[in-house]
Amino acid sequence: MMTSPISSLLVANRGEIAVRIFRTARDLGLTTVAVHSDPDADALHVRAADAAVRLPGAAPADTYLRGDLIIKAALAAGADAVHPGYGFLSENADFARQVQDSGLTWIGPPPEAIEAMASKTRAKDLMRAAGVPLLDPVDPAAATPADLPLLLKAAAGGGGRGMRVVRDLDALEEALHAASAEAASAFGDGEVFAEPYVERGRHVEVQILADAHGTVWALGTRDCSLQRRHQKVIEEAPAPGLPDTLRERLHTAAVAAARAVSYRGAGTVEFLVTADGRPYFLEMNTRLQVEHPVTEAVFGLDLVALQLRVAEGAALPPSPPAPTGHAVEARLYAEDPAQDWRPQTGVLHTLDIPGRVRVDTGFTGGDTVGVHYDPMLAKVVAHAPTRAEAVRTLAHALAGARIHGLTTNRELLVGSLRHPDFTAGQLDTGFYDRHLTTLTQAAPDAGTAALAAALAEAAPAPDAPLAARLGGWRNLRSQPQTRRYTTAGTEYEVRYHPVDHPGVRVLAAERHLVTLEVDGIRRMFHVKRNSNNTEVYVDSPLGSHTLTPVPRFPDPQDRTEPGSLLAPMPGTVVRVAEGLTPGTAVTAGQPLLWLEAMKMEHRILAPASGTLTALHAVTGQQVEFGALLAVVQEEPLS
């Protein structure tokens, strides 16, 4: 076991986790080294490091998944240790060995432990031998209706990729093919297995930390049940409402799992807890988890600092500190939950999250969110003496955040945190199946936001003549003025001076701040336009709105041929339906194309039954947002 101290650390990752690791490294006096792809050349994690090394290319396969280039970068920059973060190569045993063979310190568990847990199927065999409770596997080839519903899972990797729920045996073959293809693309391994899908189960995990001297800590539980596409959205520690006997059983099973593979460093053992309180082992993540900050908050620890000390050979104290309070984390994604969680790309003009919260992010205002990587913008964490207070604090901070330029899941997060089921601790993995429609309804009071935008637009600029500035919003032409905006598919026409909005009185209006009295209540509306004046962002206690000004004379070329299938995001065409050619008859909802973006596979469906009259997409093609992929001519009604 290498015991010499670390002096320079390379983080083989990007985004918020790289920034977070660099923060601890700086606190410990370490020199920091970043690696970056070409799109990340000016990313926050690069700006946060003492030195950076380019990985030529854009796609993960050419950059952050190239272990040989990362090791070469570490040696060239004089680093003596490599931290993998999470994702990418963090659970790659071969990479861990190559790091060690190059004379560098690996900040992670032994390669043998990674290897033992790398395949979920092999890991389950190990856990069965260690006495850890398991769900019985199901052979897809022999599945019967009695086995439904089934959960298909990639044997390698995680993060919801290569996962499918099957409720109909007729859909099993297609689901197996899709899960295998997604797993092969994400992890280089297309192996998929099946097990019973537990309805309304809870996803509960235990953070463990082990040293090389035989000490293993079980650092409490986390509940990660609120998930979309099997990816976590809101996490908290400790998992609420667990009986002490169940909590102790989970701790004991997690420690047994760690000891079974001679684990060292930080890791997480994940369980599915049924509605009647029975726990079953899911997998062990041999790395730092995305949600580790809630455990840090509750235990008052820095898990990255402890990872580094364990890697240097230090011994942990016999037991961890006592936990205090409750912590909740929300993952802020650049995605549209109302549109099948569609990821968003483009310029993030503003990212400002106020309040008594921790914000881990890889972005600042003005940065670009690209197509090649996960769409998570930030993790926002609140810690308080009680769960109720932590939940309220987090919801209030997110509600008051200013996030401009991209559609995000912010409103979904606020609605989730304030939902009666969540506040009551009634958690399970079907939460969004039941509540998504309600949680993705358009924010109210868009008309008032449009009025604020119009008044701000009409207000004199700060450098206008003094007389105009003293007139403020009142310095308008005598005739009523009209502005039109669209938001969430609805158009709003605003007429002002005099304001013809019942119950609204204008108190003040400047370019960036409008004060209105709405139904006798005074409220302030913060207004900001993006640099090319194509969108207006209005933030207030009533909600946040992104408004698109409607031109007085629309461009006739903006019209699209009926039945056109446009790329909903930039990405790569990874598959075209077998036999699909112009002239093919298609049915409404039939998958025609598969587009991969931000590490997820998205199906492009036929909008109606009819005939495919044009096909412009081919497998392997890179497409931009809005690109014409195909055209379906709808069958006329008989």
Image (cartoon, helix red, strand yellow):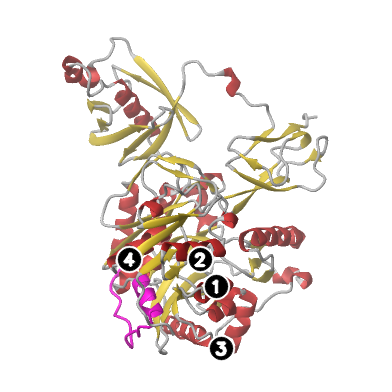
Residue 131 numbered tag: 3
Look at label 2 and name its amino acid: Ile
Q: Which residue is drawn at 69% across and 65% down?
A: 190
- Is disc 1 in contact with disc 2, using a CB cutoff of under 8 Å? yes
Question: Cα distance, mark 1 to mark 4?
Answer: 25 Å
Q: What element carries label 1?
A: helix
**Residue on which the image places disc 2:** 71
Q: Nearer the viewer, mark 4 or mark 2?
A: 2
Magenta-colored stretch includes residue 226:
no
Mark 1 / mark 4, whichever is N-terminal = 4
The x and y percentages for residue 550 are 46, 23
Mark 2 / mark 3, whichever is N-terminal = 2
- Is disc 4 in contact with disc 2, using a CB cutoff of under 8 Å? no
Quarter of the image with the C terminus in it? top right
Question: Cα distance, mark 1 to mark 2?
Answer: 8 Å
Category of crowding for the residue at label 1, using alpha-carbon neighbours closer than 10 angstroms: few (below 14), some (14–19), many (at least 20): some
Task: Using the image as rendered, state which of residue 64 and residue 624 is in the foreground.
Answer: 64
Left or right, 627 with respect to 410, comes to: right
Residue 98 numbered tag: 1
Magenta-colored stretch includes residue 305:
yes
Q: Nearer the viewer, mark 3 or mark 4?
A: 4
Q: Residue at x 22, y 24 (%)?
A: 462
Q: Is mark 3 on a helix, strand or loop?
A: loop
| Magenta-tinted stretch | 303-327
**Residue on which the image places disc 4:** 24
Q: What element carries label 4?
A: helix
Q: Nearer the viewer, mark 1 or mark 4?
A: 1
- Is disc 1 in contact with disc 4, using a CB cutoff of under 8 Å? no
Question: Cα distance, mark 4 to mark 2?
Answer: 22 Å
